[in-house]
Image (cartoon, rainbow, N blue to C red):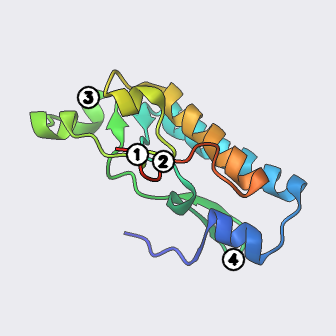
């Protein structure tokens, strides 16, 4: 396993006082990384700012593929039933289908990217989950 030194996305942006355009450039790089995962039939399922690290050189690294869904069975061999039905998510960034527990596609990651972009540009999350069960 590789050790990666850097900062979580939002902390990096704040500490480096990135402009809107610089934040958008970082976001484009994040989208390219997610696209690469999707092209390789991997759905991350827990995209959030703390799972995106930016190195001191400004490189974006996606972290925590521990709950990723592999759409290509050759990549994972045989998964046991508990692994495939186990739902882990961060509700503030989870898509409606993740919250409902229905079928997950790459669209779930795209939804999470939208929430990340909103927070990256406004400093707030679009939805508040405090006190909701």
Q: Is residue 16 above or below residue 104?
A: below
Cα–Cα gap, marks 4 and 3: 36 Å
Asked if the residue under mark 1 is in contact with the one under mark 3, i.e. CB atoms within 8 Å, the reply is no
As drawn, the label of residue 73 is: 3
Tell me where residue 45 appears, x and y as whole percent. Answer: 42, 41
Return the residue at label 1.
Answer: 132
> Going by the image, does 12 lie left or right of 83?
right
As drawn, the label of residue 56 is: 4
Q: Secondary structure at mark 4?
A: loop
Within 10 Å of disc 1 (Cα), the crowding (few <14, some 14-19, many 20+) is: few
Asked if the residue under mark 2 is in contact with the one under mark 4, i.e. CB atoms within 8 Å, the reply is no
Sequence-first disc among 3 and 2: 3
Asked if the residue under mark 2 is in contact with the one under mark 1, i.e. CB atoms within 8 Å, the reply is yes
On the question of residue 29 being in view, the answer is no
Return the residue at label 2.
Answer: 129
Q: Secondary structure at mark 2?
A: loop
Image quarter hosting the N terminus: bottom left
Q: Is residue 125 above or below residue 56?
A: above
Cα–Cα gap, marks 4 and 2: 32 Å
Within 10 Å of disc 4 (Cα), the crowding (few <14, some 14-19, many 20+) is: few
Sequence-first disc among 1 and 4: 4
Residue at image coords 40%, 45%: 132
Looking at the image, is mark 4 or mark 3 nearer the viewer? 4
Tell me where residue 23 appears, x and y as whole percent. Answer: 80, 56
């Amino acid at each position: 396993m590789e050790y990666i030194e850097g900062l979580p996305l939002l902390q990096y942006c704040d500490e480096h006082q990135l402009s809107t355009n610089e934040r958008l450039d970082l976001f484009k790089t994040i989208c390219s990384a997610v696209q690469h995962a999707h092209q390789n039939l991997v759905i991350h399922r827990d995209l959030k700012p703390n799972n995106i690290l930016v190195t001191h050189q400004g490189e974006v690294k996606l972290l925590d593929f521990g709950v990723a869904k592999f759409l290509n069975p050759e990549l994972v061999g045989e998964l046991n039933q508990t692994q495939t039905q186990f739902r882990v998510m961060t509700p503030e960034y989870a898509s409606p289908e993740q919250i409902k527990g229905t079928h997950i596609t790459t669209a779930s990651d795209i939804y999470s990217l939208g929430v990340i972009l909103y927070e990256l540009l406004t400093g707030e999350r679009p939805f508040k989950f405090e006190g909701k069960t």
